[in-house]
Amino acid sequence: MVVTNSVLIAPSLLSADFSRLGEQIKACETGGADWIHCDIMDGHFVPNLTFGQFIVAAAKKVTNLPLDVHLMIEHADQYIPEFIKAGADVVTVHQEAVYHLHRSVSLIRSLGARPGVSVNPGTPVSSLEEILPFVDLVLIMSVNPGFGGQQFIHTIPQKIQKLRQMADKLNPGLLIEVDGGITPETIGSVTNAGANVLVAGSAVFKYENPGEGISLLRKGISG
Ligand code: DX5
Ligand code: ZN
């Protein structure tokens, strides 16, 4: 996977206009997005439903950008092969939603995708100590998962700092992704704390041209 920017922006399709999904993904690509974030919700682990592997496969047809699949679902092992077959490059499971985290992460890697693990706002990063050497990415939720457009939880930068310190010892190449309430106003606080992949839904797709939202986020990083 070619990484061009040191801080990666991953627009979340959750806030896209699904009646013209292909066009919106293309506009993200030309507007400077690094990854495309796909939020998969099952109505059990989170109180909302979104889409499955067919939409991921449709996205794959229109972009060469890595597809970053965030599984907010129970029984993830049952679906991981389908998502990877559909074109997922990064697959992230929730620490709170799988029983055998190491098994899920190993399954993702064995099928050729990069594994990630996500934690909800109430889950401490100390719970990730044992899994850290086995993942490429940790996704820190900065809102309670389920919906776009929620407010950023202000204690998250401290949590990111803690994780960065742990990663320096256990997995120095770890990508730290942050998801929820990322705007030009909040983005600097998480990149300063050590995050390097930023998911943004409403802050990107509220603009007719998503590229505008992406540029404003990049400006927010540099202050
Ligand atoms: C929330 C999802 C996020 C969401 C972010 O459960 O995981 O990816 O789309 O949306 P914003 O950026 O609007 O908070
Ligand atoms: Zn997400």
Image: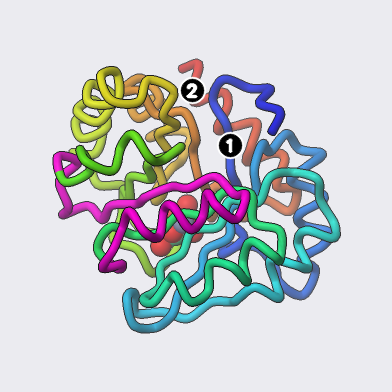
Q: Amino acid at mark 2?
A: Ile
Query: Mark 2 vs mark 1: which is more N-terminal?
Result: 1
Is 212 displayed left or right of 186 in the figure?
A: right
The residue that label 1 is drawn on is: 9
Q: Which residue is mark 2?
A: 221
Q: Quadrant of ligand 1?
A: bottom left
Q: Quadrant of residue 126?
A: top left
Q: In this image, 151 relative to 198: left or right?
A: left
Q: Kindly tell me whether residue 31 is visible in this rendering.
A: yes
In front of the other: 22 or 59: 59
Q: Amino acid at mark 1?
A: Ile
- Nearer the observer, 112 or 93: 112
Residue 30 position by quadrant: top right
- Give the residue at x 69% y 65%: 85
SS type, badge 1: strand
The magenta stretch spans which residues?
A: 97-126
**Mark 1 crowdedness (10 Å alpha carbons): few <14, some 14-19, many ≥20:** many
